């Protein structure tokens, strides 16, 4: 999945018109070209902790990771500077944590827990080493916080900073949660929130002061990782990560399962913080909640009358038919982020 864009275009105020939130990278320090590929890689992996599932870690041609379940959930994503993040809006450490979040949420949506991450970095030769140190530290700390390890990767020259992460996940004996198994009568439930990252992006784009929690939600998403395995253990039929927008990602379940999904605005009440930001920006809060991406909440379809696991709340129902509606009515447009939109 590709996430909500952070483009720089004519609508974005010049940097000097915004509140200074981020300290610019030190351009006087050593660059990647000064140190070279392997010393930079050594800095990235030095001192990183590995879980027991890492049998052979960084420093060899390949890593060796235990898969006690006998199956491995795998997902990969990329972040591209100027498209998915800006270093005047996010620190390198933020970018690293965000890269882990968007990948870890994908395997959590399958009902798995992340066990290992592989990282590919591309950057111009004049990139300050401090930038890659920050990205690597963010990735490593976020991975270790999940009980996973960074087991390998690559560093190459590119025209801009690119972070590509692949995650491995363990199902611990559970059946995987797919998009294709929702059934009419199921309860559609949500773990986490939607609209907060989109609101944070809007705040940054407008150059507003305030709303730090919304800005933080965009800079570093906080997926409900444990909710995925809990949903699988609790009998969920289908699930997905909400990366491109609630309606768009529920649309994937509806299409794969051959069902219709109806969500309820009443059950998705945005709350005072989102409403306040929308009022200040003159924005439609429901556009954020229904179509905003990058919160990395999880959505799942549970059998009717089955108690929802902790952290899950009902937001809609599965019906016969096709497509996604809101309070019984369709909405125009794709319902979320499109990777190749202009």
Image (tube, rainbow, N blue to C red):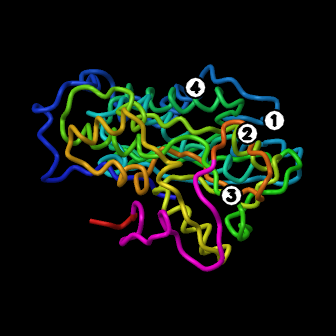
Q: Judge by depth and name the residue closer to the eye, 44 or 198.
A: 198
Nearer-N-terminus badge (4/1):
1
Residue 131 in which image quadrant: top left
Q: Indicate the secondary structure of the residue bearing disc 1.
A: loop
Q: Judge by depth and name the residue closer to the eye, 88 or 325.
A: 325
Real-space Cα separation, disc 4 to disc 3, in angstroms: 35 Å
Q: Is residue 335 left or right of residue 303?
A: left
Look at discs 4 and 3 and give the one toward the viewer.
Answer: 3
Nearer-N-terminus badge (1/3):
1
What numbered label is drawn on residue 53? 1
What numbered label is drawn on residue 115? 2
Real-space Cα separation, disc 2 to disc 3, in angstroms: 30 Å
Q: Is residue 338 left or right of residue 101?
A: left
Q: Residues within 10 Å of mark 2 (few under 14, many from 20)?
A: many
Q: Which residue is mark 4?
A: 141
Real-space Cα separation, disc 2 to disc 4, in angstroms: 13 Å
Q: Are marks 2 and 1 in contact (CB under 8 Å)?
A: yes
Residue lying at 26% horizontally and 38% vertically, measured from the top left: 203
- Return the x and y of residue 54 as percentages of the image width and height: 78, 35
What numbered label is drawn on residue 187? 3
Q: Indicate the secondary structure of the residue bearing disc 2.
A: strand
Q: Which residues are magenta?
A: 314-337
Residue 46 in which image quadrant: top right
- Residue 218: say if magenta: no
Nearer-N-terminus badge (2/1):
1
Residue 85 in which image quadrant: top left
Nearer-N-terminus badge (2/4):
2
Look at discs 2 and 1 and give the one toward the viewer.
Answer: 2
Residue lying at 69% horizontally and 23% vertically, measured from the top left: 49
Q: Are marks 2 and 4 in contact (CB under 8 Å)?
A: no
């Amino acid at each position: 999945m590709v996430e909500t864009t952070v483009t720089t275009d004519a609508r974005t105020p010049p940097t000097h018109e915004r509140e200074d939130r981020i300290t610019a990278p030190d351009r006087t320090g050593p660059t990647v070209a000064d140190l070279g590929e392997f010393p930079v890689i050594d800095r990235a992996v030095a001192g990183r902790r590995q879980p027991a599932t890492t049998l052979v870690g960084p420093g060899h041609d390949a890593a060796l990771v235990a898969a006690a379940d006998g199956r491995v959930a795998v997902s990969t994503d990329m972040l591209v500077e100027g498209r998915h993040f800006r270093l005047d809006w996010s620190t390198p450490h933020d970018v690293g944590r965000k890269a882990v979040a968007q990948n870890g949420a994908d395997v959590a949506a399958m009902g798995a827990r992340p066990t290992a991450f592989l990282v590919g970095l591309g950057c111009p030769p004049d990139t300050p080493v401090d930038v890659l140190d920050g990205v690597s530290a963010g990735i490593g700390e976020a991975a270790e916080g999940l009980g996973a390890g960074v087991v390998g990767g690559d560093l190459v020259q590119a025209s801009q900073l690119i972070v590509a992460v692949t995650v491995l996940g363990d199902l611990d004996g559970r059946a995987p949660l797919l998009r294709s198994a929702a059934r009419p009568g199921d309860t559609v439930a949500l773990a986490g929130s939607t609209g907060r990252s989109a609101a944070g992006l809007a705040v940054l784009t407008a150059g507003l002061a305030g709303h730090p929690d919304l800005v933080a939600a965009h800079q570093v998403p906080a997926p409900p990782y444990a909710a995925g395995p809990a949903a699988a253990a609790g009998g969920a039929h289908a699930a997905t990560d909400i990366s491109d927008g609630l309606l768009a990602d529920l649309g994937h379940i509806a299409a794969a399962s051959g069902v219709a999904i109806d969500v309820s605005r009443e059950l998705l009440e945005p709350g005072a913080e989102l409403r306040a930001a929308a009022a200040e920006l003159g924005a439609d809060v429901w556009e954020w909640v229904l179509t905003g991406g990058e919160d990395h909440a999880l959505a799942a379809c549970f059998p009717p009358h089955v108690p929802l696991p902790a952290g899950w709340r009902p937001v809609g129902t599965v019906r016969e038919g096709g497509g996604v509606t809101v309070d019984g009515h369709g909405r125009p447009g794709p319902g979320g982020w499109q990777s190749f939109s202009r």
